[in-house]
Image (cartoon, coloured by chain):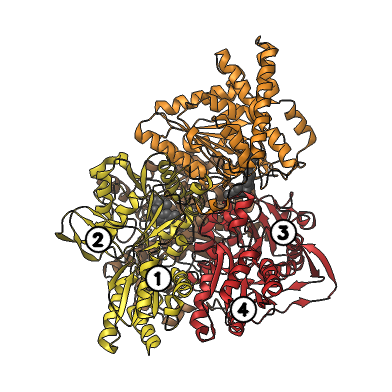
Chain colours: A yellow, B red, C brown, D orange
Amino acid sequence: MAELTRTEMTRTEMTLRDAVTRGIAQEMRRDESVVFLGEDVASAGGVFKATPGLLAEFGPRRVRDTPISEQAIVGAAAGAAMTGLRPIAEIMFSDFLAVCWDIVANQIAKTRYMTGGQVTFPLVIRTANGGGLRFGAQHSQSVENWAMAVPGLKVVAPSTAADAVGLLAAAVRDPDPVLFFEHKALYPVRFEVPDGELVDELGTAKIVREGRDCTILALAAMVPKALVAADELAASVGIDAMVVDVRSLVPLDTRTICEAVARTGMVVTVEENPRLCGWGAEVVSLLTEEIWADLDGPPIRITTPHVPLPSAAELEDATIPSATRIVEAVRKALT
Amino acid sequence: MAELTRTEMTRTEMTLRDAVTRGIAQEMRRDESVVFLGEDVASAGGVFKATPGLLAEFGPRRVRDTPISEQAIVGAAAGAAMTGLRPIAEIMFSDFLAVCWDIVANQIAKTRYMTGGQVTFPLVIRTANGGGLRFGAQHSQSVENWAMAVPGLKVVAPSTAADAVGLLAAAVRDPDPVLFFEHKALYPVRFEVPDGELVDELGTAKIVREGRDCTILALAAMVPKALVAADELAASVGIDAMVVDVRSLVPLDTRTICEAVARTGMVVTVEENPRLCGWGAEVVSLLTEEIWADLDGPPIRITTPHVPLPSAAELEDATIPSATRIVEAVRKALT
Amino acid sequence: MTTERTETRASGPADPARRLDLYRLQVELRRFEKRAYDLFMRNLVKGTSHLSLGQEAIAAGVALAMRPDDWTFATYRGHAHTLARGAPMTPVLAELLGRENGLLGGKGGSMHLTSAEHNMMGSYAIVGAHLTLAAGAAWSAQYRESGQVAVCFFGDGATNIGAFHEALNLAAVWSLPVVFVCENNLYMEYTPIGSVTAVPRPAADRAAAYGLEPVVVDGNDADAVYDVASAALDRARRGDGPSLVEAVTYRHGGHSRADPGTYRPDEEVEAWLARDPVTAYRSRLLGEGVEEAELLAVESGVDAAVDRATEEAIEAPPPSAEAILTDVWADGGSSWRN
Amino acid sequence: MTTERTETRASGPADPARRLDLYRLQVELRRFEKRAYDLFMRNLVKGTSHLSLGQEAIAAGVALAMRPDDWTFATYRGHAHTLARGAPMTPVLAELLGRENGLLGGKGGSMHLTSAEHNMMGSYAIVGAHLTLAAGAAWSAQYRESGQVAVCFFGDGATNIGAFHEALNLAAVWSLPVVFVCENNLYMEYTPIGSVTAVPRPAADRAAAYGLEPVVVDGNDADAVYDVASAALDRARRGDGPSLVEAVTYRHGGHSRADPGTYRPDEEVEAWLARDPVTAYRSRLLGEGVEEAELLAVESGVDAAVDRATEEAIEAPPPSAEAILTDVWADGGSSWRN
Ligand SMILES: Cc1ncc(C[n+]2csc(CCOP(=O)(O)OP(=O)(O)O)c2C)c(N)n1
Ligand SMILES: Cc1ncc(C[n+]2csc(CCOP(=O)(O)OP(=O)(O)O)c2C)c(N)n1
Ligand SMILES: [Mg+2]
Ligand SMILES: [Mg+2]
């Protein structure tokens, strides 16, 4: 379980996009070797307005606009990371990771291993992930499972603004490459965030709602939906669902996850990635292998169906898992 | 289950690499719209010598050497496919799919859906997949799970020369994009192949060894290892293992797989891809969801550990699943 | 081929009826995009969208120079290119609104407009990729000796991405019948192209790297665009290979619906507004002796069509949810299993 | 900067001791690669490997022009570049043989030689990627004002891949201290570069696309290479940005161990063998008055070192299997879970 380092406990309300700015600024103030690059991130403050003010505070030497060259962006981050800097690179939409997947999956992820540990890649690739904004199939994917499948990458996806600040700080301080998935549907959502320096811990899941009857495992934008579903289940049919925010896919907090599932005997994963080879599949195979005897029934996976994402509002809403689908699936499984 | 279309039943011995040439030639003779492109595939006959003679038979109009431009290779295949041709594109090593992953995963896989079905991509991307040749982390990966995770791609991986011919023919005739993974460790292996035209069926698994005690699901180069393990299990401890060659990850022959597992109540997947989000995870989550009651114990996954592949012979052999590991895992699970 | 030096001699289509078509098309693109903008403002368009306001002369000039069986490949900024190839307004507008009668059934939205029926082979929203697809279509034309040409539109920003380089080289080496048209509107999203590009002319200054002639054209002059496009299409059809055309222009509004475009200096915006391609073409026709009444008739005809399309789009129902599970595979379905 | 026209005035290092170093290094690269080849033939090297036989003048000439803290980035054809930066022969050879005392502990093999200790930052086996990494290292040098320069070697075939384009443009725009050295050996694997490239000089004819001067150098003349490299390194250190150098050369053998190289015309091979860089440099030194005895001493010193390395590599044990689970993460381990 995660422990926050908090220098004080007063709180401020802010959006997830504000939290991202705050997290980057916190780390850039602390460490001169932290630099930040990406398309339209400097003068314009990012297309999601998640990085305004950084150019003004840290100047064009540390906050850099790039050409539309995703391979050069992450490649430059990699080369800089292996020679003394700690770059944060933005890939505007996570779909575009495909454009630079060789650099991410074949170079950054493997080179430490291939060289027998001679080089390291202390870098963060931040990216806007997920659907809900009616952007269609090339700007809405959840590709956290792509990253999880590649040995050598750490993979984080916060569901709250406080987690965004703290996990981003942890990612920047981590000596290994971290893919940091910010969910674009959460950017405008407001959260209470403790003031002061926040530093969280990678590889830690969080029980965000206690419950006795079943355990819902969710990530990023699926966490608030799982919480709504849990309330609805409690209110309508008296099912008491625990909700675990997985937060980190690599490292995976298997201890918290196994314990949480063992306590209820029933597990439902809520994944935004399309069905095949999603993170939930991995977690289910882990659970059956490790706590088979504690399972009272088959694990259930709720995912985006194995289709690209449609753009029309009604279609997108029918595709991405909703609180209603979670409620129905849990109800069906438990009755 | 697969049915082969055979015009006659005499057989010839040939390697997997010969089978690939034969499959391509069979389809190019049949259909003038089939064209073939890739790096060093024409004059040189391919770096794995899997395509010699095609240039001589079909000429430089239909068999084309390309620059080192993987995006242009698969992009050209895509553009040609949507305008009347049926291209076969070679990506020399499957690791290099990362270099053109945007074209494969974001363009080819999604455009039919995004356009409401206005365009189709009848194309095949052939690629040399997998380890065993001491090529190291950037030339040895098994990335079938990358492809399986993307909605809109069909994914095939033969384990024998006859399957290679028949499934390649089926892939070329299929109106959708097919990623065709040829295992490079199988290229030099000799098999008996029926003469005449071979056309197999995508989406069909094959029981390649009957057995009562447990069901081993394997793919590509893991199939012969599973068969060796099954013989060893029978001989040494009297365990009678069924072996299923999964052959096609998308579409997935869930019917054959579920039946085969239900018959023994015990399942072991043997995956060459690294652990996290491998195809076995998906299959395990499918089995627990659909035939929970038929399972006598937890599904077991044998995978390459979640690390990049090392190059030294002793290290590579210790990394990729071996017949010995399969024997041990099955023995442990059943005793 | 036309280069910067010859720009001033732009003649455009000779036939007066075609000249009027060229005007009509520009007016149609202009008024459609303005309507699209109004509908955003009324919050009827969900998602994002990217308008071609100010860039109409390029879409119109190229499209009218094309043969009906030539192919268009465009970016997310593709409304104009889709309409210019003949796709009717109603389904295009309905697609922006995510309606059942949308061009893509509501599955693609503004960024992916496609009308295969009109050989408009798609709008692609990840920068660079579609240049390679256009090369592939051109390969298909060459292979089948069909005489078709693929025309591929992209922005100045796309010239710095890897796929641009690969597509241009392959097209040149294989002498493919493809015309690459860079719509250089001086900006990527919010960043000026000059600040992230090693050469002043992002496309033309790269032509030599592929053995091609640099071609720069005034993208706000439909006649000049028409001339350059005609020459490039002829060249491709003759078997002389690809062209890379840089059409210099400016977008009147922001990059996408969310963007007011305030990062651009006022004087720059004003100077370009003063060079409005539609107004300029209107004046030119009047100067050539076309009756104003004729132009007014064109304009009101277009207005009526835009109004009708708006109504037909707004009144249509949303797509039904079953649609999410169709169209992945050629069999119409999406099943990954038996 | 030196261009084709000035090639003939190559002077190389002025100091006679450095000139001898340049010879010694070329001999070392030559004899090491020959030994590597022999060991393949004896089936002691597993996997693949790519020799620099014939291309030694480039690795040697550039390396001797570099500062010790400058970085090298190379391809799978990286034995020469690794040795040239000072990595000792034994671990390099042991890595080819997959031994425990290998430079990478047996985890990378021939294609991934790296010696961070010598600022040899890696050999990368997927064409194109490492050009972007070299740009990033140069960015780090620029940021830290360390005066370091990144030198990146790649083949002619790499000039057609997207990452080349992106790396060159970024390096130019940011004026990064990086020297891109294209070793143009006229062939990719088995395909002549000219048959798939739109311009005759795959690197130099692209320089202008990034606002750079075309630089072509005789890659078989170590002095010429040294001069060009020195100029490019100076330029980078002065803050004047990147260079793109095309060094024309030829590999004596096939592309990789499996390839006899028979696709090349005999006369072409012969002509290039006659231009052997090592022999040529030997003659030049003799012409300058160096005693043959001195050269013989260099040669036998190298031979002894190669023999010693061979023994030390062959005698070493294979790595132990536990190594497969180390070195994924900076903590030394590979755990993806708690
Ligand atoms: C590979 C990729 N990177 C980034 C983006 C985000 N993006 C969308 S449009 C755009 C600017 C494109 O500029 P330009 O090519 O000049 O075209 P314009 O929008 O001006 O027509 C960017 C960066 C993208 N869609 N794809
Ligand atoms: C992206 C990618 N595509 C293909 C290959 C396979 N491949 C390895 S070396 C090579 C030829 C490279 O030629 P060149 O750049 O001229 O370098 P050389 O081997 O001649 O030094 C190819 C095609 C690769 N490693 N990476
Ligand atoms: Mg632009
Ligand atoms: Mg070469």
**Residue C242 visible somewhere in the drawing:** no
**Which of these two is toward me, B55 or A274?**
A274
Q: How far across and down, in percent of the image, does residue B59 sit?
A: 76, 55
Of the four image quadrants, the one with ligand 2 is top right
Q: Residue at x 45, y 29 (%)?
A: D69
**Which of these two is toward me, C279 or D295?**
D295
**Residue B138 visible somewhere in the drawing:** yes
Label 4 amino acid? Cys
Element under disc 4: strand
Position of A324 compared to B244: left or right? left
Q: Callout 2: 10 Å neighbours few (<14), some, many (20+)?
A: many
Element under disc 1: strand
The mark lying in front, picked from 2 and 1, is 2
The mark lying in front, picked from 4 and 1, is 4
Distance, label 2 to label 1, CA atoms, is 21 Å
- Disc assigned to residue A162: 2
Distance, label 1 to label 3, CA atoms, is 38 Å
Give the chain letter at badge 3.
B
Label 3 amino acid? Tyr
Q: In the rendered image of this protein, does residue C159 appear above or below residue C81? A: above
* Image quarter in which the C terminus of chain D is found: bottom left
Q: Which residue is mark 1?
A: A272
Q: In the rendered image of this protein, does residue A44 appear above or below residue A217? A: above
Distance, label 4 to label 3, CA atoms, is 29 Å
Q: How far across and down, in percent of the image, does residue D51 sit?
A: 66, 37
**Which of these two is toward me, B107 or A263?**
A263
Position of C29 compared to A18: left or right? right
Q: Same chain for marks 2 and 3?
A: no
Residue farthest toward the top in the current orientation of the protein: D289
Label 2 amino acid? Ala
